[in-house]
C-alpha cells in the first residue's frame, strides 16, 4: 500500500528556489492588490507559479469551507485540456469519502500521495479519485488546504503523471501559495460584503424617499420595494400581497418579473383571506415567514390549483421566500420572492426582506391614515 502522509513541512528552501519563490510571492501579492473583488486572476497566477516552481504539469484550486455541501471550481491549469475540463465539470461533495480535496478542507491538513492509484479512496472506487487516476493518468498528488482566519476556505492541488513525490521544500512553497490564495478569498469576500451593505443602505434610502413622496398612494413604494428586493436577493419574480382593512380578502397590488398574461390575471386577484392554500394568502393568515426550497414539490401547496400550476409550470418558479408585513400583532400583507432554480434563500436574504416589509407597513399605514383624514 502506498504511503499517505500529512505534512506541515517548514523546511528551508534551496537558495535558487527561495529566490524564485520570493519573486513569485511578490507577483501574487501584486495580483491580490490589483484584484480586490476578483479572485480568478490571483488563482491563475498562483497555479502558474506553483506548477513552474514545483515541477507539476497540472494543478487545480477548489473553493469551499467545511460547512458547504460541495467544493466549487476556482481555477485550473494543465497541459492536457481534458484535465482542465474535468476540473471545471467536477461535482465534489464536501464529504470525507468523496475526495482528498474534501478531506484537506475538512481536516485542515495536507494530503500527499506518492501514488494516488494506491490510495484508500481509489481502492474504494471514489468517482473523482478514480477519474483522476484512470482517465487522466495522475499518480503523485498533493492537496494543501487554503487556511483562512476562521478555517479552511478551499484547497490547492498539484498533480504529476509519474510516481515522484513532492520534495519538502516544494511542499513548504505550496503552503505559502495556499496562504496567498486564502488572503485573496478573504479580501474578495470582505469587499463583496461591503458592496452588498452599501447597496442595501442605498436601497433603504431610496424607499424612504419614495414613502415621503407617496403619502396618498402606496403602489410606488411597493414597486420600489420589489425592485430592490429582486435585485439584492437575486429573485427575478416578486409579489406583494395586501389584506383588506376588514381582513376578509387579499389583493396583489404589485408584482415584478411575471409574464404579461399572468400579470393581467394578478391585476384581478381578489381572494378570500381564509381557506386559500396560496402563498399570497397564507403568509398573511399565518403571519409567519414561509420558506420552500422547491415549491413544486412542497406538499403544502396543491398541485392542481390553477394559479399554483401557473407559477410552477409556466413561470418555472422553484425556491420561495415569503415574509409577512406585520402591523401591531397581525399580518396585513406579504412580500413574496421566487427564484427559477433550486437555490434556497439565506438568512441574510430573510433579514433584508424583513427590513423591506417594515417599510411596506409604513407605506400602507400612511396611506390608510391619509385616506381616513380625507374622507
Image: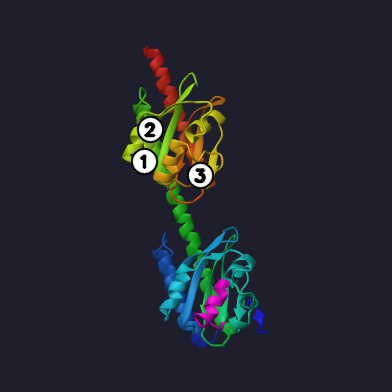
Label 1: which secondary element: loop
Determine if the magenta segment contains residue 3.
Answer: no
Residue 179: tell me if it is visible: yes
Residue numbers of the magenta segment: 127-140
Residue 1, x across and y down, in percent: 68, 84
Q: Classify residue 181 as left or right of residue 114.
A: left
Label 2: which secondary element: helix
Residue 67, x across and y down, in percent: 59, 58
Instruction: State the residue lying farthest toward the left.
Output: 260
Q: Looking at the image, is 358 positioned above or below residue 298? A: above
Q: Classify residue 175 as left or right of residue 373.
A: right
Q: Which residue is mark 2?
A: 266
Work out which quarter of the rendered image holds the C terminus and state it.
top left
Mark 1 and mark 2: span between their CA atoms? Answer: 10 Å
Label 3: which secondary element: helix
Determine if the magenta segment contains residue 138.
Answer: yes
Q: Which mark is residue 258?
A: 1
Q: Which mark is residue 295?
A: 3
Q: Looking at the image, is 365 positioned above or below residue 237? A: above
> In the rendered structure, which disc, 1 or 2, sits on the residue that comes first in sequence?
1
Residue 275, x across and y down, in percent: 53, 28
> In the rendered structure, which disc, 3 or 2, sits on the residue that comes first in sequence?
2
- Cβ–Cβ under 8 Å for marks 3 and 2: no
Check disc 2: other Cα within 10 Å, few if <14, some if 14-19, many if 20+. some
Amino acid at each position: 500500500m502506498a504511503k499517505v502522509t500529512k505534512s506541515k513541512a517548514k523546511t528551508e528552501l534551496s537558495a535558487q528556489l527561495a529566490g524564485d519563490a520570493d519573486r513569485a510571492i511578490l507577483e501574487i501579492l501584486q495580483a491580490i492588490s490589483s484584484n480586490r473583488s476578483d479572485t480568478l486572476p490571483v488563482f491563475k497566477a498562483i497555479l502558474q507559479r506553483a506548477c513552474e516552481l514545483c515541477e507539476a504539469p497540472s494543478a487545480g484550486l477548489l473553493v469551499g469551507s467545511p460547512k458547504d455541501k460541495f467544493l466549487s471550481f476556482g481555477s485550473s491549469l494543465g497541459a492536457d485540456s481534458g484535465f482542465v475540463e474535468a476540473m471545471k465539470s467536477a461535482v465534489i461533495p464536501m464529504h470525507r469519502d468523496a475526495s482528498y480535496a474534501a478531506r484537506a478542507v475538512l481536516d485542515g491538513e495536507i494530503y500527499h500521495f506518492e501514488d494516488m492509484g494506491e490510495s484508500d479512496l481509489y481502492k474504494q472506487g471514489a468517482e473523482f479519485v478514480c477519474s483522476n487516476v484512470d482517465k487522466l493518468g495522475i499518480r503523485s498528488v498533493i492537496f494543501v488546504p487554503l487556511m483562512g482566519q476562521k478555517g479552511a476556505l478551499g484547497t490547492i492541488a498539484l498533480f504529476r503523471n509519474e510516481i515522484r513525490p513532492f520534495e519538502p521544500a516544494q511542499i513548504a512553497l505550496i503552503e505559502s501559495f495556499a496562504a496567498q490564495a486564502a488572503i485573496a478569498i478573504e479580501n474578495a469576500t470582505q469587499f463583496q460584503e461591503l458592496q452588498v451593505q452599501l447597496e442595501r443602505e442605498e436601497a433603504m434610502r431610496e424607499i424612504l424617499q419614495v414613502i415621503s413622496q407617496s403619502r396618498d398612494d402606496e403602489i410606488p413604494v411597493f414597486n420600489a420595494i420589489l425592485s430592490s428586493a429582486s435585485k439584492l436577493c437575486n429573485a427575478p419574480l416578486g409579489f406583494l400581497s395586501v389584506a383588506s382593512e376588514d381582513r376578509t380578502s387579499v389583493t396583489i397590488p404589485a408584482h415584478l418579473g411575471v409574464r404579461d398574461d399572468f400579470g393581467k390575471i394578478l391585476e384581478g386577484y381578489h381572494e378570500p383571506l381564509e381557506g386559500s392554500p396560496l402563498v399570497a394568502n397564507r403568509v398573511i393568515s399565518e403571519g409567519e415567514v414561509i420558506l420552500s426550497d422547491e415549491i413544486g414539490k412542497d406538499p403544502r401547496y396543491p398541485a392542481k390549483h390553477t394559479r399554483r400550476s401557473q407559477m410552477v409550470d409556466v413561470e418555472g418558479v422553484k425556491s420561495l421566500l415569503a415574509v409577512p408585513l406585520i402591523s401591531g400583532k397581525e399580518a396585513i400583507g406579504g412580500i413574496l420572492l421566487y427564484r427559477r432554480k433550486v437555490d434556497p434563500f439565506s438568512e441574510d436574504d430573510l433579514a433584508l426582506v424583513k427590513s423591506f416589509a417594515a417599510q411596506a407597513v409604513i407605506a400602507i399605514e400612511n396611506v390608510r391614515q391619509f385616506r381616513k383624514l380625507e374622507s
